[in-house]
Image (cartoon, rainbow, N blue to C red):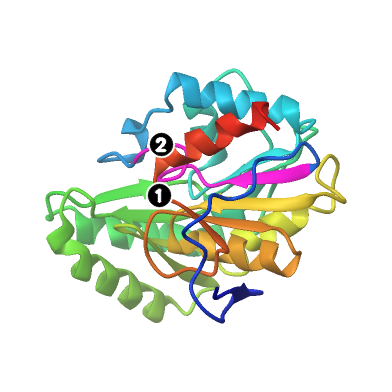
Amino acid sequence: MTRWDGGRRTGAPRRAALPPAPQPEWAYFFDIDGTLVDFADSPRAARLEVNLREFVDRLYRFSGGAVALISGRAIADIDDLLPGTRFPAAGQHGTERRDAAGAVSHHAFPSHELDRLRHALSRAVAPHHGLVLEDKGLSLALHYRRAPRLGGYAHRLVRSLLGASGSPYSIQRGKRVVELKPSGRDKGVAVLEFMTEEPFRGRTPVFVGDDSTDEYGFATVNRLHGHSIKVGSGPTAARWRLRDVAAVRAWLERSGNT
């Protein structure tokens, strides 16, 4: 059987077997869209199924609180999606982070340059029906899920603005979205930060995600000898694979049967 080693391809990820059943001594890191919830036309239209929320809550108790959500969403949007419990979370690809004690930190960024990029994108996007510019506060996301034919234009536009600005921002590509975010932050960095803190410290890390943005997380947990789990199809550094959001739910159900 072929393998992946530390984020480098040495073969194909396992497909025949499910990932190992969740264990109480692991540390869990989840992407949200495409992993815990199905994609919607816009981020605010996504909804977490009631029973899936129950499985996440159960896993949180099962693991002693070692569950964090690591998403391109802002932390405020994460909390709107999962009201009632303030999970440890990294928002905007790690640009902001809330630890298990509830303390929130933000990555320093040049706000004046983000303002310039925001205004330029707003002007360029306005004539194109179906393009949605999401302002997350510390980053900008240009969604073309409603107008896939405009994907090429969206990517060219963001590249041209970044090239002209010479700013410390980088491009983050995802599923029918292209983002501008401060450089030096990604989901793998967020995992490393959580792993230095309680209740994550000393545990085996598990990262579950579906998108190219999650590859940073996969590579990190591979280096830490953890479990990387890709949701859906496509090339990946992950060592395991689950078919879809429903398969993630079925895997989480196993946490009560270990």
Q: Report the front residue among 113 and 157.
A: 157
Specify the amino acid type for callout 2.
Answer: Ala
Tell whether position 33 is magenta.
Answer: yes
Kind of element beneath mark 1? loop
Total numbered labels placed on residues in the image: 2
Q: Which mark is residue 215?
A: none
Left or right position of 169 against 198: left
Q: Quadrant of the C terminus?
A: top right
Q: Is residue 221 visible?
A: yes
Left or right position of 33 against 160: right
Q: Is residue 166 above or below residue 154?
A: below
Q: Which residue is at a point 48% across and 73% down the rendered structure image?
A: 12
Q: Report the front residue among 26 and 97.
A: 26
Q: Is residue 104 above or below residue 209?
A: above
The quadrant where residue 4 appears: bottom right
- Magenta span: helix, strand or loop, mainly? loop
Q: Quadrant of the N terminus?
A: bottom right
State the image coordinates of residue 227 (x, y, percent, origin top left): 66, 56
Q: Is residue 76 above or below residue 143?
A: above
Left or right position of 51 against 30: left
Q: Which residue is at a point 83% across and 39% down the rendered structure image?
A: 199
Chain part drawn in magenta: 26-38
Q: Which mark is residue 246?
A: 2
Q: Which residue is at a point 20% across and 70% down the rendered structure image?
A: 152
State the image coordinates of residue 43 (x, y, percent, origin top left): 36, 39
State the image coordinates of residue 240 (x, y, percent, origin top left): 55, 58
Q: Is residue 186 visible?
A: no
| Residue identifier under label 1 | 243
Q: Is residue 236 above or below residue 190?
A: below
Using a 10 Å C-alpha cutoff, classify the residue at mark 2 as few (fewer than 14 neighbours), some (14 to 19) or many (20 or more). Answer: some
Tell whether position 34 is magenta.
Answer: yes
Specify the amino acid type for callout 1.
Answer: Arg
